[in-house]
Image (cartoon, helix red, strand yellow):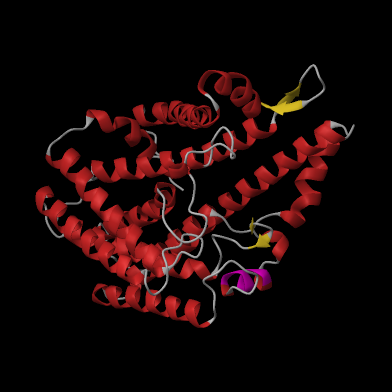
């Protein structure tokens, strides 16, 4: 059984991390090309693929990683899993706190004469009542914990039945509770508001509705388990051409099933609908098969090294990108006319827009932000420093 690291998997992981950083950091949220926006509700754009692709890759990596230990479940394995999941959740929570603190410090700096220490104290502690509890890393932490437990404690032949059961059950609940629309009565919003409180939730169009909600994390567990199944197809043979064929067939079947499921519950990222789970997993499997053919079969590796640098330290670069994004968005200067402007606004409005225009300037800013993150990732990659969370 082949256990060595697949370069194509690292590259796909790097593509998704770079994609997540890009779509989260436009020059202006009001000037974005349509493919770089999330679908407003039902539907799918390229932007809606990056997070589910990463979750799929998590499942693939999970299977490959645990296969090295023959999927043995013991006290030591459980404690390592628990530690990693709790750490990932806390880092996500701290990243939310850091962003909230930066925003409030920036707001107080523009409107009050408070000292720096007073602004920091009020922002860091008083506004904790507005701290969002959930988020991307928090969802990954929950899914990593639940998916790993299922993989390690249940026979692998039952995993397809678990996936189907979760997706079918989730669809039935969403249909029978009338939860396919954005409202406070939606079961996803209702559960989060009861457990977390509306002040600790993300808001969409003025409605407390978290796209990384607790209940909508349920199909994400099925999502990562589909990645586990793809990982099993990778390790079933040592021949990369056969691996590519297996993944291509698997991805096609899953994608077609997802598009058919769309007629039951529509493809929707915010709800993380069952059809969305299947379609995005299918597309991720197809892309992985193509990259496997290009990189691991044909040996074209030079053009992929940019993304490999992101892929070997994905969580660390994502967190660093989040910190940098909050800093450039909330540290600024007061112009001669008395107007305060952030570093991000300064670069976008006074450099990018005059040269490239609004939408292209916004995209150029996002690409430059990725390049900045790459300059952080590159030394780690060259020195083979892997920061594991």
**What's the magenta bit mostly, secondary-structure-wise?**
helix
Q: Quadrant of residue 1?
A: bottom left
Magenta range: 188-193
Number of numbered discs visible in the structure rendering: 0
From the top left corner, tell me how far across and down residue 230 is, in percent: 25, 60
Q: Residue at x 38, y 64 (%)?
A: 277
From the top left corner, tell me how far across and down residue 32 is, in percent: 52, 38
Confirm whether residue 148 shows in the render: no
The answer to whether 319 appears left or right of 111 in the picture is left
Q: Residue at x 43, y 64 (%)?
A: 220
Q: Residue at x 85, y 35 (%)?
A: 111
Residue 159 drawn above or below residue 57? below
The answer to whether 227 appears left or right of 138 in the picture is left
Q: Quadrant of residue 213?
A: bottom right
Residue 276 drawn above or below residue 301? below
The answer to whether 105 appears left or right of 216 in the picture is right
The answer to whether 113 appears left or right of 79 in the picture is right
């Amino acid at each position: 059984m082949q256990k060595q690291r697949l370069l194509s998997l690292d590259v796909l992981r790097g593509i998704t991390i770079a994609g997540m950083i890009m779509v989260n950091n436009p020059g202006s949220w009001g000037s974005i090309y349509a493919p770089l926006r999330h679908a407003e509700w039902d539907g799918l754009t390229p932007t809606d693929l990056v997070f589910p692709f990463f979750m799929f890759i998590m499942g693939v990596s999970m299977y490959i990683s645990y296969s090295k230990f023959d999927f043995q479940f013991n006290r030591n394995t459980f404690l390592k899993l628990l530690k990693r999941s709790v750490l990932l959740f806390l880092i996500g929570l701290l990243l939310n706190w850091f962003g909230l603190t930066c925003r409030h410090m920036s707001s107080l700096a523009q409107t009050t004469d408070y000292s720096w220490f007073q602004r920091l104290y009020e922002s860091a502690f008083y506004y904790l009542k507005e701290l969002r509890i959930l988020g991307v890393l928090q969802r990954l932490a929950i899914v990593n914990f639940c998916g790993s437990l299922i993989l390690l404690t249940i026979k692998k032949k039952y995993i397809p039945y678990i996936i189907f059961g979760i997706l079918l059950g989730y669809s039935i609940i969403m249909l029978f509770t009338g939860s396919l629309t954005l409202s406070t009565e939606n079961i996803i919003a209702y559960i989060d508001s009861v457990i977390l409180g509306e002040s600790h939730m993300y808001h969409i169009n003025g409605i407390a509705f978290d796209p990384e909600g607790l209940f909508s994390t349920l199909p994400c567990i099925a999502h990562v388990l589909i990645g586990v199944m793809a990982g099993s197809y990778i390790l079933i043979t040592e021949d990369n051409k056969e691996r590519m064929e297996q993944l291509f067939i698997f991805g096609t079947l899953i994608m077609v099933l997802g598009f058919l499921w769309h007629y039951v519950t529509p493809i929707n990222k915010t709800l993380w609908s069952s059809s969305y789970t299947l379609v995005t997993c299918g597309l991720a499997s197809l892309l992985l098969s193509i990259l496997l053919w290009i990189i691991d079969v044909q040996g074209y590796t030079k053009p992929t090294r940019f993304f490999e640098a992101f892929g070997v330290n994905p969580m660390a670069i994502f967190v660093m990108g989040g910190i940098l994004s909050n800093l450039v968005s909330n540290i600024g200067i007061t112009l001669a006319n008395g107007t305060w402007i952030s570093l991000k606004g300064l670069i976008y409005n006074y450099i990018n827009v005059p040269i490239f225009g609004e939408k292209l300037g916004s995209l150029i800013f996002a690409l430059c932000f990725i390049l900045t993150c790459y300059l952080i990732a590159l030394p780690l990659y060259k020195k083979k420093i892997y920061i594991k969370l």
